[in-house]
Image (tube, rainbow, N blue to C red):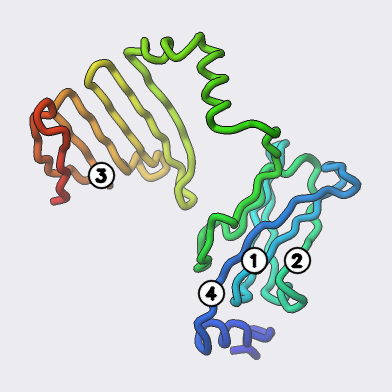
Amino acid sequence: MDNAAGEDLSWFWNEWFMSTMTLDQSVKSIDYNGGDPSKGSLITIENLGEMALPVTVLIKEENGKTGTVKLPAEVWQRGGEWTFPYKSTSKVTLVMLDPDHKLPDVNPDNNALSGIKIPTGVTAATVISNYLNAIGGADKVRAIKDLTINAAGTLQGVGIELVNRYKSPDKFEYNAVAPSYNNYVVLHLKANGDSVSTVAQNRWLKIIRSNLKRIPFIVLVFP
């Protein structure tokens, strides 16, 4: 197989069949040539585990450009750290390893790094406090009786659209669909008082209803 592939695959045979090694790739830092993002960036990645596998790096820039860099397993032959240049033209907002989640990384939390630094002193509490102050105080939030929240994102490369609706005092609806898959219903949950209906993965769920005023829970059972 080495001859057919035209490369040395000993790293694969040793790691997958001859040992119990684990994989832990991570993004260490993002730097710029001369401190200027328009002159290109230098991205440093690490191999914190024993396995040495190829690396796929997704890079996003502040100007909206994206790029993918693929590095062979041989980059780890010189040690557990590797720095490579990237021809960026603006600040790098995100560097993510294994964007398609194909590798058995034991610690995926360190697979991404944002190039946008958070100012000193900014915490979740300060962000919430500033938001409440900007809209006139917490009482403004308590006074909301009808609210709709729209969001969109991707899940394993599939676009998902989310809609949350709240209506005081006891109406709620959550809808997550995949438009590119003929509006495939990932999850639809609708509550009106103590009556609940839901669809998950295009299937209706059997629902055991209870009087929520007496028993504050609902049990959902897949058919």
Q: Classify 10 Å Cα crowding around label 4: few (below 14), some (14-19), many (20 and above).
A: some
In front of the other: 89 or 80: 80
Q: Amino acid at mark 3?
A: Ala
Reply above or below: 110 against 177.
below
Question: Separation of disc 3 and disc 4 at Cα?
Answer: 35 Å
Q: Classify 10 Å Cα crowding around label 3: few (below 14), some (14-19), many (20 and above).
A: some
Which image quadrant: the N terminus?
Answer: bottom right
Instruction: Give residue 93's quadrant in the image.
Output: top right
Q: Mark 1 or mark 3, which is nearer the start of the sequence?
A: 1
Reply above or below: 101 against 128.
below
Mark 4 — residue? 22
Q: Secondary structure at mark 1?
A: strand
Q: Mark 3 or mark 2, which is nearer the start of the sequence?
A: 2
Which of the numbered marks, if any, corresponds to residue 55? 1
**Horizontal placement of 20 versus 7: left or right?**
left
Q: Secondary structure at mark 2?
A: strand
Q: Secondary structure at mark 4?
A: loop
Mark 3 in CB contact with mark 4 (< 8 angstroms): no
